[in-house]
Amino acid sequence: MTDLGEIGSKGGKPHEKHNVETPFLMVAFHGHSDGSFQPSSHDDFGIPGPKPLRENLVWFFYTFRINRSTRGGVILPLYWMVVIRERELKEVGITREKWLVSLIVSLILGGLLFWQYYRSFEISAATIPTFLVVAYTLWEVVFVCGWLQLRFEEAFGIIPGIILAGFCFSIYHLGYGWYDLPGLVGLFGAGLFLAIVFRFTRNILILWPFLWPVGCLRGFKMGGFSPDWSEAVFSAVFLVLLLISIFIFDRMQKRRAVLKENAPDLPNSK
């Protein structure tokens, strides 16, 4: 495996070597190969130069990771469904249908999970940044359940859609360093559970903002991930951008509906 500690060692003493045992995406998202979020001179991707420069580049990789999840996990699927296919946002689980039932179920399940978290782990002011970071997992809900699961369901049926969504949920965590088989099996089980819950209302509100983020909160704690306020601010900003993107696509579909109502001779939706 490539030793990133050798990068930038030209013309001088090689930088301290790093045995990279986790994928680059995990390091880019979490900052440290050991799961910690805070960058330091000992975890800098082997980037040469002063410590401030190294840390700025580490944060660049972090923001790039979040930015890519926003674009690839949410904006591109929404663009495909709303603009290209001319379908509604409810086709990716973004809908007002059954919103109250969805929120109540999410609150109950999320509350039970949070109670388990509260009994198992200590909650302090240091936990607040983690709450903000896990709130950004809205993109995961839209991508895994709203996009992948419902597309699998269209192609293969309800049960295969649930199974494939659970499988994808576990596999994409390889990018965060989940190499051991028991861990992947556990993630597959969690993915199945979330997919089944989502299928009851086909509304993302049944998973977010309560159930899914609390599950991630517990996963962060068990994995030793401790985001600070820098990550919290980045996540909050991109969450706002994500919500704005959803609002824009919602306005686009409503405008198209009005235009078709006023001009009934236009072709039907694709």
Image (spheres, grey):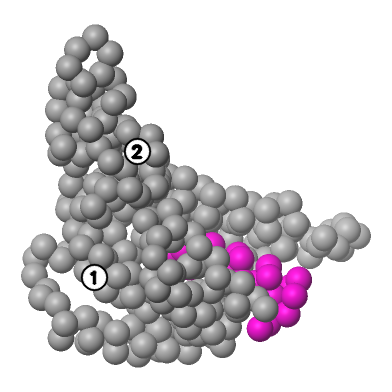
Q: Are the two marked residues, 1 and 2, in contact with CB atoms closer than 8 angstroms?
A: no
Percent across and percent down for residue 34 are: 23, 52
Q: Nearer the viewer, residue 47 or 251?
A: 47
Q: Decide which of tag 1 and tag 2 comes sooner along the chain.
A: 2
Q: Residue at x 38, y 71 (%)?
A: 183
Crowdedness near tag 2: few (<14), some (14–19) or many (≥20) residues, C-alpha within 10 Å = many
Q: Is residue 231 visible?
A: no
Q: Quadrant of residue 186?
A: bottom left
Local SS, label 2: helix
Amino acid type of the residue that numbered disc 2 sits on in the rendered structure: Phe
Q: Residue at x 46, y 80 (%)?
A: 189
Position of residue 100 relative to residue 88, above or below, is below
Q: Which corner quadrant holds the N terminus?
A: top left
| CA separation in Å, label 1 and label 2 | 24 Å
Percent across and percent down for residue 208 are: 41, 73
Q: Is residue 16 left or right of residue 268?
A: left
Name the residue that disc number 2 marks. Answer: 61
Crowdedness near tag 1: few (<14), some (14–19) or many (≥20) residues, C-alpha within 10 Å = few
Local SS, label 1: helix
What's drawn in magenta, residue-wise?
A: 138-159
The magenta stretch spans residue 247: no
Q: Residue at x 31, y 32 (%)?
A: 4
Name the residue that disc number 1 marks. Answer: 222
